[in-house]
Image (tube, grey):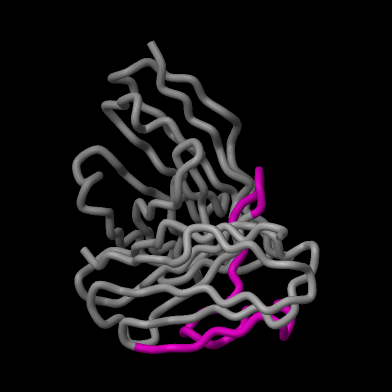
């Protein structure tokens, strides 16, 4: 199973500042990487797939980068509605199975 | 608009089974697979498996093999996830989501509580 490790566990950021979240895979997943946002009591929301393609309706302040084993989600200027938990997820073909990182909580500084 | 509407909360005893439904609307059901993801209280997301709504092919997480069955009813555009031999650590919110690899639309979640 591919293990996804996210860092940091918690990120304290002031509104308007830039947030950079990291995700590392235990083996290469090429660009088969997605990012999700989850707010309390809600289902996750797809932000990025293919490591860098924004999903429908996602604001341009969200961007993804990386390939292989190292990935980054950047929120260029944090808005109040962006404080949430963010998960990365790999969907490489082999080994079979999809796995999520443990999440990064973005909180107000 | 695409919607996935799940069945309501369940309380089950250890050893029992639960079957959660997920009714899709707003798109051609057979054009996409349905995946199931669960989230234990205060924990992260765990992928459970996927079913093709086109031909019924499935791919289950190794740790759940033998206990989980995913099915679809194309006549009602509904997907089902059955989990058997429930244990306390199966207590979680269970989500259905559209897609095989990444998941662009999600149901609202179904809380399954396993308690004696």
Quadrant placement of the N terminus of chain B: bottom right
Q: Nearer the viewer, residue A40 or B87?
A: A40
The part of the chain drawn in magenta is A39-67
Left or right: where A34 falls relative to B116: right
- In this rendering, the answer to whether A25 lies above or below A30 is above
- In this rendering, the answer to whether A106 lies above or below B79 is below
State the image coordinates of residue A21 (x, y, percent, origin top left). 52, 73
Q: Residue furthest top?
A: B116
State the image coordinates of residue A16 (x, y, percent, origin top left). 79, 75
Left or right: where A73 falls relative to A22: right
State the image coordinates of residue A73 (x, y, percent, origin top left). 54, 78
Residue A63 lies within the magenta run: yes
State the image coordinates of residue A6 (x, y, percent, origin top left). 42, 66
- In this rendering, the answer to whether A29 lies above or below A3 is below
Please count the marks in the image.
Answer: 0
Q: Nearer the viewer, residue B28 or A14?
A: A14
Q: Residue at x 53, y 49 (%)?
A: B78
Q: Residue at x 44, y 52 (%)?
A: B45
Residue B114 lies within the magenta run: no
Where residue A68 sits, quadrant-wise, is bottom left
């Amino acid at each position: 199973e591919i293990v996804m490790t996210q860092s940091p566990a918690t990120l304290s950021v002031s509104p308007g500042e830039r947030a950079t979240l990291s995700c590392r895979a235990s083996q290469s997943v090429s660009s088969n990487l997605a990012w999700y946002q989850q707010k309390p009591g809600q289902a996750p929301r797809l932000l990025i797939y293919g490591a860098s393609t924004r999903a429908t309706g996602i604001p341009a302040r969200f961007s993804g980068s990386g390939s292989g084993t190292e990935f980054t989600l950047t929120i260029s200027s944090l808005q109040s509605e962006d404080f949430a938990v963010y998960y990365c997820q790999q969907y490489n073909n082999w080994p079979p199975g999809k796995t999520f990182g443990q999440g990064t909580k973005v909180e107000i500084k | 608009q695409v919607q996935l509407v799940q069945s309501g909360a369940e309380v089950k005893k250890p050893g029992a089974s639960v079957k959660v439904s997920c009714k899709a609307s707003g798109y051609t059901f057979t054009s996409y697979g349905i995946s199931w993801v669960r989230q234990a209280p205060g924990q992260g997301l765990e992928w459970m498996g996927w079913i093709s709504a086109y031909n019924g092919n499935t791919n289950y997480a190794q740790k759940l093999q033998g206990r989980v069955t995913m099915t679809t009813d194309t006549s009602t555009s509904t997907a089902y996830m059955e989990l058997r031999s429930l244990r306390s650590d199966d207590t979680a919110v269970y989500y259905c989501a559209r897609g095989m690899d990444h998941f662009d639309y999600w149901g609202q979640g179904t809380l399954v509580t396993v308690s004696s």
